[in-house]
Image (cartoon, helix red, strand yellow):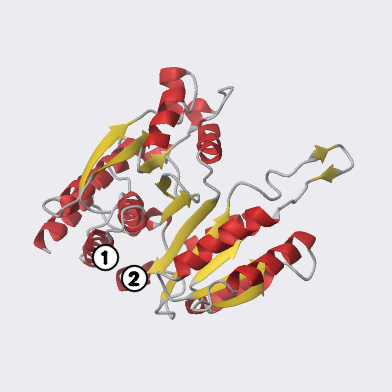
Amino acid sequence: MNGRSFEIAVLPGDYIGPEIMRAGLAVLAAVSKNKNFDYKIKELPFGGAAIDKDGDPLSVNTLKECQDNDAILLAAIGGPKWDQASKRPEAGLLEIRKALNLFANIRLTAISPAMQKYSPLKQIKKIDFLIVRELTSGIYFGKPREESEQAALDTMRYSATEIRRIVKIAFQTAAKRNHHVTLVDKANVLATSKLWRRIANQVAKEFPEISFDSCYVDAAAMKIISTPEKFDVIVTENLFGDILSDEAAQITGSLGTIPSISRGDHGPALYEPIHGSAPDIAGKGIANPLSMINSVAMMLDHSFNRKDLANRITDSVNKTIEDGTTTPDLGGNSKTTVVTNAIIKRIEEN
């Protein structure tokens, strides 16, 4: 994909969002310099900032720009300022996922030697796996949905098409990693899980070079803590993925370092930190920029096939952590800009 200029939609969002986005873009500029990677950015209002400007968290113009770009970088949205708004900032994220058909969320759980001391699982030395979560169907979206004083009803529904497309993404992702996929379900109880298992076994036959197994969700929750090194790519439905990905995030020791991708079969993917907008520290200059910077690395790898540039970023991030140049949430006393500049210095030295 080299040799052309790429277009990146940039959504700084709210509270600490613009602060960490500046850090991410500064690192992108540094790692791209003289490396045959040309790009243009288009900064757009989104979330609460868009409500203030346009009266809607996702304007028609912002959506069109996102659709027309090669990738989307999002920092963080939401906060108490818009709690009483008729349409909250988070609604914009649901809308953009739907409009761009971003049905797969991919979260990395990895602990580098630099981050080992922050993990509650200090005895486990090798943790590096992905959770591929179905994002646009399942019990969160199923109908009918009813609630009364004495009873309530939620509906979990999946089609074979919805399952097949995300399971394929899991296998395609594993092909670039350690060639192993684990389906997490509850096929001993749930009809939807039985369908997931049947479809996943069919897809597995299309990828004979990838090893495949399945695991009940309760067992998976235990194994993520007891033997996380045995996982490579986990694929699962929306509710299970929501819970397991947050559990997995905790074993890294900090939400402030973890990136994520939301993607579909075609079109731009959306890259963002997994943490929120942190209104309590906005404007203080102490926001941890690492999750945003790692999201930039993920974008370079997955959307632009520049693993070389992605590795330069992650190596520089890890060395900066090892040096002790960290924000207060990681036990340091460095400002956002100090951490960012230290990473950029490492990149320039490599």
Residue 182 to residue 302: above or below: below
Residue 95, located in which quarter of the rendered image?
top right
Q: Verify CB contact (< 8 Å) between mark 2 and mark 1.
A: yes
Q: Label 1 amino acid?
A: Asn
Amino acid type shown at disc 2: Ser
**Residue 121 at what x, y percent from top left?**
46, 74
Q: Is residue 342 left or right of residue 18?
A: left
User: Where 8 sits versus 123, above or below?
Assistant: above
- The number of numbered discs placed on residues in the rendered structure image is 2
Q: Is residue 55 above or below residue 243?
A: above
313 or 290: nearer the viewer: 313
| Secondary element at tag 2 | loop
Give the residue at x 24% y 67%. 322
Q: Which residue is mark 2?
A: 112
Distance CA(mark 2)–CA(mark 1): 7 Å
Q: Is residue 115 visible?
A: yes
User: Residue at coordinates 42% horizontally, 29% vertically from top-left?
Assistant: 64
First of labels 2, 1 by sequence position: 2
Is residue 221 among the parts visible in the rendering? no
Q: Nearer the viewer, residue 221 or 123?
A: 221
Tell me: 235 left or right of 7.
right
Q: What residue is disc 1 on?
A: 318
The residue positioned 45% from the left and 44% from the top of the image is: 276
Quarter of the picture containing the C terminus is bottom left
Left or right of 8? Residue 222 is right
Q: Position of residue 320 (x, y in %)?
A: 22, 62
* Residue 117 against residue 304 in the figure, above or below: below
Residue 159 at what x, y percent from top left?
70, 53
Which residue is nearer to you in this view: 217 or 119? 217
Give me the disc on residue 181: none
Q: Callout 1 environment at 10 Å: few (<14), some (14 to 19), or many (20+)?
A: some
Residue 245: percent from left, percent from top:
54, 59
